Image (spheres, rainbow, N blue to C red):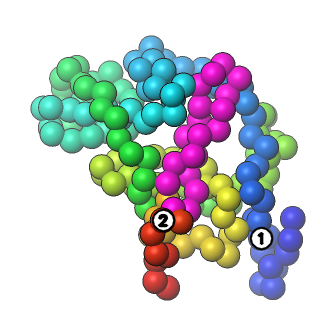
Amino acid sequence: MKTRPDGGVAVDHQAPDFPSEPTPRSTFTKEYWAATRERRLLVQYSAETERFQFFPQPISQGGARRDLQWREVEPVGELFAYTVTHLAQGAFRGSVPYVVATVTLDVGVRMISNLVDCPAERIVIGMRVRGTWLPLSDGTHLLQFRPDETVAEVAS
């Protein structure tokens, strides 16, 4: 861990050593997790509201219907918010510091994930990010994000 000139801690790790054990999952997230085995991102779509929704739920967020569709989307978007985690509980205790990020996908939903491969001094709200997949012990993958090097950086 490096100390910044302002006394803060610089996060310059390439990829934290996150736990590889999956978390408990509900039955209505089964399709989501199955798709991660192939590194595909599925997001629920409500024909009733004509909107995507995330996190997976048994009913539409804007209505009361259960006829949600799973649609594959690109895991690309922009950084909405972030925090650097320095204290962690349980399995994440050995992974600090790491960046917890809220990403707004291009389809309009927000996801909470991790931002990896990005030093703290390069993190900018609004920066473009792209998904990357961390393998888990059961063959599924955890979606994380890294800076999207295929686009220009956000102007300061």
Neighbourhood count class around disc 2 (C-alpha, 10 Å): few under 14, some 14–19, many 20 upward: few
Q: Amino acid at mark 2?
A: Thr
Residue 151 quadrant: bottom left
> What main secondary structure does the magenta stretch of the protein show?
strand
Residue 15 relative to residue 154: left or right: right
Residue 82 position, x and y percent, is 57, 61
Label 1 amino acid? Answer: Ala
| Residue wearing tag 1 | 10
From the viewer's side, name the closer residue of 63 and 140.
140
Residue found at x 30% / y 49% = 107
The residue depicted at 55 percent of the width and 40 percent of the height is: 143
Q: Are marks 1 and 2 in contact (CB under 8 Å)?
A: no
Task: Judge from the rendering whether residue 7 lies leftward or rightward of residue 40; answer left or right.
Answer: right
Residue 135 among those drawn in magenta: yes
> Earlier along the polypeptide chain: callout 1 or callout 2?
1
Instruction: Identify the element where label 1 is drawn.
Output: strand
The residue located at (73%, 30%) in the rendering is 20
Give the image location of residue 16, x and y in percent: 76, 49
Residue 150: which disc? Answer: 2
Question: Range of the magenta residues?
Answer: 130-148
The secondary structure type at the circle numbered 2 is: loop
Name which quarter of the figure residue 115 lies in: bottom right
Look at 20% across and 37% down and name the residue there: 62
Locate the N terminus and report the quarter of the image it occupies: bottom right
Where residue 39 sits in the image (x, y, percent)?
A: 51, 33
Magenta-colored stretch includes residue 144:
yes
Q: Nearer the viewer, residue 148 or 93?
A: 148
Residue 110 seen: no
Classify 63 as above or below 144: above
Residue 101 found in image quarter? bottom right
User: Above or below — where is 10 with respect to 52?
Assistant: below
Pinpoint residue 90: horizontal percent, then vertical percent: 78, 34
